[in-house]
Image (tube, grey):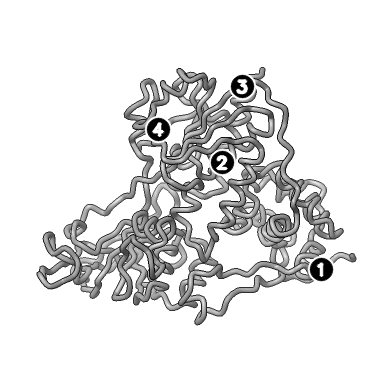
């Protein structure tokens, strides 16, 4: 196929906004074969491969795209999985625009190659048409425990299993996948996709045990006593942050973590669900990251009139631009340069919610302006005195970040953490202050992206292999 020098990438087919705003089906529909072949032909196969250096797990991008271009989609999949244990996930939720695609040469005079869209196409093609199970390597006689089945844990487990390690993954919840199943909505990442990725690891020999809370059901010390020679902690950052403003204890105030877990993991959006969740009414989502967009778009699909309140301007909004655009198209309103100062409530004995502490009726906000840059280079939001105003609300969802759960650090002697509760590690190995214990992902950094957590899992797996095998 001749090179395709068209400056724009093939568009991603998707559900129309008016339709998708009322269902939980996947928004992006994926490339068909013709679009994938056409997009693959846009790759210039640069000699220095800048896209690979932009990928936290170093997928050999030009090589897999060359196989797509030749029509050998299974070969493309095998190339991707040499570096990534979760290609169908990464093709959907990774911020390629800030990583591999940001370094694509085609982006200098047009749009970069749609690397993420091609990765998704290849993974979906494999899952649909390939019946071949992964080849299980010969055991090497070593045992490793992985705490948490999120992106970092699954990646570490997959890389070690490919080298013959007997790997056991311990997951606190009843379903494997970590933030991929409790945090990211069905319309962005269908849970069947996550299950397929977990099943592939099981076929490699990874033992996944759910409903095991390390630090409570078992400790790190007990894992070593059971014969595990190394432990990787990828327990994520599941402890929600709050603003510390009056009214956060009112009924109708959710952390985004709780709200999304009820909807995603517990399927509360279904009519027959046993898990309660607030549906409809006026919903205010506080925050501007990807989690805030997920919460806002979920609340919209549950029948809410949704507003996002964020203290900076659109230019500083940290969420992926694609997610912001989707939210706007679907009807989410954005109230920028505003910040809540208190949540107002009322007491009504006839309200179906527990009236003991009062229920949400409004959010008082103050208008902001941007001042001098902070340590990250973003202009600081500054309150405008006397600019307070009130927004009516039935539900408030706080989406301003999460912190690592303190359970493991509180039950593991010799494990050093920073002031935010993140486990301190050596950057090049993931090794902690405790011998034989490694960590990575959100448990170290706080809430970050899926692909960065995967990169940390790969780093630790390599270090564990070098420590145990020399």
Return the disc, 4 or 2, that comes first in the chain's sequence: 2
Q: Quadrant of the C terminus?
A: top right
Q: CA distance from mark 2 to mark 1?
A: 38 Å
* Residue drawn at x 25%, y 61% as measured from the top left: 253
* Viewer-proximal residue among 240 and 196: 196
Residue beneath label 2, please?
A: 154
Determine whether the residue tagged by mark 1 lies in a helix, strand or loop.
loop
* Viewer-proximal residue among 241 and 158: 158
Residue 235 location, quadrant? top left
Return the disc, 4 or 1, that comes first in the chain's sequence: 1
Q: Position of residue 123 (x, y in %)?
A: 69, 55
The label shown at residue 142 is 3
Question: Mark 4, mark 1: which one is toward the viewer?
Answer: 4
The label shown at residue 5 is 1
Q: CA distance from mark 4 to mark 1?
A: 53 Å
Return the disc, 1 or 3, that comes first in the chain's sequence: 1
Return the disc, 2 or 1, that comes first in the chain's sequence: 1
Question: Mark 1, mark 3: which one is toward the viewer?
Answer: 3
Q: Quadrant of the N terminus?
A: bottom right
Q: CA distance from mark 3 to mark 2?
A: 18 Å
Q: CA distance from mark 4 to mark 3?
A: 21 Å
Residue beneath label 4, please?
A: 214
Q: Are marks 4 and 3 in contact (CB under 8 Å)?
A: no
């Amino acid at each position: 196929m001749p090179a395709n020098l068209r400056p724009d990438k093939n568009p991603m087919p998707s559900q129309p906004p008016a339709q998708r705003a009322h269902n939980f089906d996947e928004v992006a529909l994926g490339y068909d074969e013709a679009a994938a072949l056409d997009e693959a032909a846009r790759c210039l196969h640069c000699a220095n491969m800048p896209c690979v250096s932009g990928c936290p797990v170093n997928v050999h991008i030009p090589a897999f795209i060359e196989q797509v271009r030749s029509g050998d989609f299974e070969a493309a999949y095998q190339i991707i999985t040499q570096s990534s244990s979760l290609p169908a996930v990464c093709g959907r939720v990774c911020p390629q625009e800030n990583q591999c695609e940001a370094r694509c040469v085609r982006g200098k005079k047009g749009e970069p190659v749609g690397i993420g869209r091609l990765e998704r196409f290849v993974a979906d093609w494999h899952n649909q048409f390939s019946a071949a199970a992964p080849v299980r390597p010969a055991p090497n006689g070593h045992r490793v425990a992985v705490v948490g089945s999120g992106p970092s844990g699954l990646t570490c487990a997959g890389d070690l299993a490919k080298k013959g390690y007997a790997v056991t993954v311990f997951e606190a919840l009843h379903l494997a996948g970590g933030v991929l199943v409790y945090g990211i909505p069905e319309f962005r990442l269908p849970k069947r996709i996550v299950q397929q990725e977990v099943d592939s690891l099981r076929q490699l020999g990874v033992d996944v045990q759910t409903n095991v809370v390390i630090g409570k059901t078992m400790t790190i010390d007990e894992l070593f006593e059971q014969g595990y020679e190394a432990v990787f902690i990828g327990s994520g950052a599941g402890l929600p942050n709050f603003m510390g403003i009056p009214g956060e204890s009112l009924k109708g105030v959710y952390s985004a973590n709780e709200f999304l877990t009820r909807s995603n993991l517990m399927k509360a959006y279904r009519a027959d669900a046993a898990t309660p969740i607030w549906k409809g009414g006026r919903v205010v989502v506080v925050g501007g990251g990807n989690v805030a967009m997920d919460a806002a778009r979920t609340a919209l699909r549950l029948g809410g009139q949704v507003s996002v309140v964020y203290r900076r301007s659109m230019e500083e909004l940290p969420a992926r631009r694609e997610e912001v655009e989707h939210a706007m198209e679907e009807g989410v309103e954005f109230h920028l340069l505003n910040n809540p100062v208190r949540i107002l409530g009322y007491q009504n004995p006839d309200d179906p919610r527990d009236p003991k502490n009062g229920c949400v009726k409004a959010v008082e906000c103050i208008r902001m302006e941007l001042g001098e840059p902070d340590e990250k280079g973003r202009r600081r939001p500054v309150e405008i005195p006397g600019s307070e105003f009130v927004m009516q609300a039935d539900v408030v969802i706080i989406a301003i970040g999460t912190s690592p759960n303190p359970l493991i650090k509180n039950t593991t002697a010799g494990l050093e953490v920073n002031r935010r509760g993140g486990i301190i590690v050596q950057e090049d190995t993931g090794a902690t202050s405790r011998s034989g214990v490694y960590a990575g992902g959100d448990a170290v950094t706080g809430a970050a992206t899926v692909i960065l957590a995967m990169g940390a899992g790969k780093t630790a797996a390599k270090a564990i292999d070098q420590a145990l095998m020399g």
